[in-house]
Image (tube, rainbow, N blue to C red):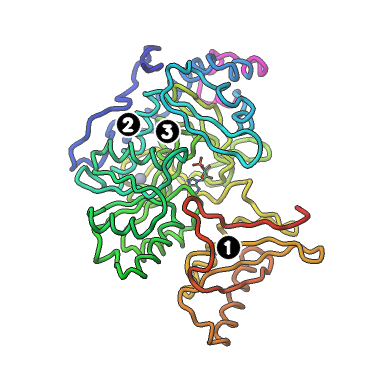
Amino acid sequence: MCIFAKDNITNIINMAQKHIPDSSCQYFNEKEETLTREQIEALQLERLQATVKHCMNSPFYKARFEEAGIKPEDIKTLDDIRKIPFTTKKDLRDTYPFGMASTSLKDCIRLHSSSGTTGNPTVILHTQNDIDEWANQVARNLWMVGLRPDDVFQNSSGYGMFTGGLGFQYGAERVGMLTIPAAAGNSLRQIKFMTDFGTTALHAVPSYVTRLKEVMDQAGVDPKTDTKLRVLAIGAEPHSEEQRRRIEEMMGVKAYNSFGMSEMCGPGVGFECPEQNGLHFWEDYYIVEIVDPETLEPVADGEIGELVLTTLCREAMPLLRYRTRDLTRVLGRSCPCGRNHVRIDRMKGRSDDMIVLRGVNIFPIQIEKILMQFPELANNYLITLTTDEDNDNMTVEVELEELFTDDFQRLLKLTSDVKRALKDEILLTPHVKLVPKGSLPVSEGKAVRVVDKRTVYQ
Ligand code: AMP
Ligand code: ZN
């Protein structure tokens, strides 16, 4: 069952195709991946119109359109998308659990839910076709970075409600790889899988790759000589270019940035090509807008704003102009790899992760970028915000690559160098504590980089 086929839309090409191309082909879905800009936009308009029409089956969107005084027929051009009100996480919570569904529950085969820190969790429903299209996007990404059916793919991502597990599982299987659902944690077992099963590709959150390498060092396993690893997919959490380069260096392979979110299925939405110059967001599946988070007006290419996504191929729960809260920018709309799907910069952070300290706006990734410039520092760090005698302060704890706590002068000098570099970047001087490697907490899922213990929030 596919709403798009049912609506008899022409020009929809090879959706959820099940074929596996010849290994020498650099594209998984050659036609879709090499569309020209004109073809992409024509396809987007067609799919947007179909999606909007389909959304009228959802009580939420029907009411939204009535309130805004618009009808599906008013969407005549791609620019008309701006007539459509934004959808937010609050809308998802308010309609919990099924108020946003555009198909009946009997047509759905999967539910993913993410727990919110406040209020209701959010629910995302999928039809069989949604799951197939999701797998197709992930397969496209993995193929793009050179993975082929003879690769062995180990997925060290949490399974269950977290979409990084099943999302990568289905995508890697679609490519035809031997896929190992290793799940998160248990590093010694991960390493055994890697060496025993000949893992050639690994997916994990970046902070976990660092942890895995530490355990490898302790176990005397060198990823460069003792494994067949050749590709890493890292994502699901913000990380700096400096962090990526470190990961590549310590593991001896290329690490490609993978972006996804449960609301858009999960992983698969955007992925770097071998050029590593921004993530290609698949525009046959999504309309990508970058807007000013205050005015909600579009910003020019190259300017940072909030990423807003509209799904174009979703049946169970299409989302129109979803405000992701992720801040990024458009890098370009062409690429030497032959794909004209928009290139999006690595995420600068989420607007809700921004630290406001004494009136200054700071993103954790800015701090990470500076820390990673010091070879003496390891990859794990923690930012703690406190209120001390009515003053708000920041403490940055970072692990040392090698312990030299007995060399006091060296430690003092490094601490003050790190402080100065951080001040140049964030315009405030934090406390800096250099701690032994392995002493900061490591989470199995996304890393917790900021702990806010302030009594008065600014
Ligand atoms: P979830 O729905 O729990 O998978 O979380 C999705 C969120 O994770 C996104 O909105 C981003 O804030 C973050 N995220 C996912 N992938 C990346 C990535 N490659 N770089 C930075 N942040 C990411
Ligand atoms: Zn490219």
Ligand 2, by image quadrant, is top left
Residue found at x 60% / y 82%: 412
**Could you say which disc has been placed on residue 382 in the image?**
1
Mark with earlier residue (1, 3): 3
Residue at mark 2: C-beta within 8 A of ligand 2: no
Q: Position of residue 241 (x, y in %)?
A: 46, 58
Q: Position of residue 127 (x, y in %)?
A: 41, 23
Q: Which residue is mark 3?
A: 283
The answer to whether any part of residue 432 appears in the image is yes
Part of the protein shown in magenta: 65-83
Q: Indicate left or right for 122 with 428 as reference.
A: left
* Label 2 SS: helix
**Could you say which disc has been placed on residue 407 in the image?**
none
* Label 1 SS: strand
The amino acid pointed to by label 1 is Leu
Q: Position of residue 204 (x, y in %)?
A: 40, 51
Residue 101 magenta: no
Residue 68 magenta: yes
Mark nearest the camera among 2 and 1 is 1
Please tell me how crowded label 2 is: few (under 14), some (14-19), or many (20+) other residues with Cα within 10 Å: many
As displayed, is residue 38 above or below residue 454?
A: above
Mark nearest the camera among 1 and 3 is 1
